[in-house]
Image: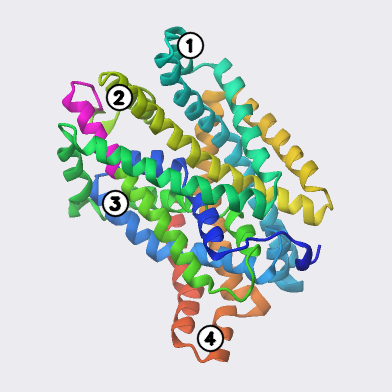
Amino acid sequence: MSSTTRDSFHSRLGFVLASAGAAIGLGNIWGFPTQVANNGGGAFLLVYLVVTILLALPALYAEVYIGNQMQANPVAALKKACGERFGKIGESAGIIGLIGALMMLSFYTIVAGWMLAHSLSPVAQILGSTESSTWLASSSTLRNVIFTPVFIVLTAAIVHQGVHAGIERWSSRLMPLLLMMLLGLIIYILQQEGAMKGLELYLIPDFSQVTDANLIIAAMGQAFFSLAIGVGAMMVYGSYMRKDQDIGKLVLSIAALDTFIAFIAGLLIIPALFVALHHGQQVFENGKLIGQGQLIFQILPSLFSSFGFIGSLVTFALFTLLSIAALTSTISSTEVVVAYLVEAKNMSRKYATNGVSLLVLIASMLIVINFEAIFGLVIQLLTTILQPLMSLFYFIVVGWMWHRGNKLTDLAQLQNNKKLKLFGFYLRYICPTLLAVVFIHLAF
């Protein structure tokens, strides 16, 4: 399919909001604060910011740049970028990215379904249906079987509409709503007793912890997951922008918005933990959170329920916020596979979206049936292995394989751009070396 027939974003803002939506999800609002609480508070925040600047931001640039220059889905883009000699390797890497997107969707839609159910629980409570409220807030296979498909259908309904009419339009509506709800919740939580202790833990780093290898690896995994790098989402979004756009500025905007949301999510969740602690709830055990699931699904709802009617409204707002964050992420991962099927297999968008949704439903139901054995394993494989490995491959493509040389360095020489030349050197040598060091540490 030629680039002239492809759907596209109609504005820079639409691209930034959609891409930020792809990046901003449960990893930012749920995962990031949990990692902060479990890995030294301010020390993790500091390392996370450093890793984002040194590795995640360049990886995001490389992924968006490949998609933008090739104007194609991730499989075709990587095949073309790798040239005739290494085209098969690029194509295979692109297919691995598709598998990664499906892996992400398979567990993400389950968790998103939890958020949706929990957002309805306080509504049922307000309407006087205590039994329904309890069921919606309680983990069960039946609840997963009902709400996971609901979320898959919600995602498919937006992807069906295309890039501009669906993804761009809905991202432009949902992202500002997400930000406003998040800021409103922060203002409310910071007024509660105990919140300042959480704020202190979050913002004042213990510098003795910043060299902890496990903390650094956790921060790297979180950075790649938060920015949705390595599954092709940013590559396909980049391909929907014209080539004449300043990709560097756009990528900086995406990363800045994503990091800002993660940071202010910490301003909500970490103080909320200490508010719960102030109210006599058990939050930590042996210096660690008593569990991610318990944090978001038990501790905070239990805390808010003690505030009466206002607490029910806050619970509804929190889980609606998390549902919106999840939706903007599942849209992008679904689009990765849909774009490939539309362009490479000449399927209509409707049939491609329906096919991907059915595949995700089957995979997610398999995880639901074998939850204890599979759920955590899928997340670990994706965030600590597949995403960093794909990022390493993007560095190699841009730095070494593109026309058998460094694409950015060649461009810098043509434009006599010293900053771009330096960045090309950084992508070619420094980024792969840093990632390789991390993988060596993991292996041994």
* Tags 2 and 3 touching, CB below 8 Å: no
Neighbour tally class for label 2: few under 14, some 14-19, many 20 plus, Cα within 10 Å: few
Give residue 310's mark.
Answer: 2
Point out residue 98 in the picture as x, y percentages from the top left corner: 67, 49
Give residue 132's mark.
Answer: 1
Q: Which of marks 3 and 4 is nearer the N terminus?
A: 3
Point out residue 254 in the picture as x, y percentages from the top left corner: 47, 60
Neighbour tally class for label 3: few under 14, some 14-19, many 20 plus, Cα within 10 Å: many
Neighbour tally class for label 4: few under 14, some 14-19, many 20 plus, Cα within 10 Å: some
* Tags 4 and 1 touching, CB below 8 Å: no
* Tags 3 and 4 touching, CB below 8 Å: no
Question: Which residue type carries mark 3?
Answer: Leu
Point out residue 380 in the picture as x, y percentages from the top left corner: 49, 40
Query: What distance separates the C-alpha of mark 4 from that of mark 1?
Result: 62 Å
Task: Judge depth for marks 1 and 3 and give the one in front.
Answer: 1
Q: Which of marks 1 and 3 is nearer the N terminus?
A: 3
Point out residue 204 in the picture as x, y percentages from the top left corner: 17, 50
Q: Which residue is drawn at 25% across and 54% down?
A: 210
User: For the magenta stretch, what is the residue range?
Assistant: 267-283
Q: Which of marks 2 and 1 is nearer the N terminus?
A: 1
| Quadrant holding the N terminus | bottom right
Residue designated by label 4 = 412
Question: Which residue type carries mark 2?
Answer: Ile
Pick whichever, 400 or 151, lies toward us: 151
Residue designated by label 3 = 45
Question: Which residue type carries mark 1?
Answer: Ser
Asked which quadrant contains residue 26, the reply is: top left
Q: Which residue is drawn at 73% across and 42% down?
A: 353
Q: Earlier in the sequence, mark 2 or mark 3?
A: 3
Q: Is residue 96 visible?
A: no
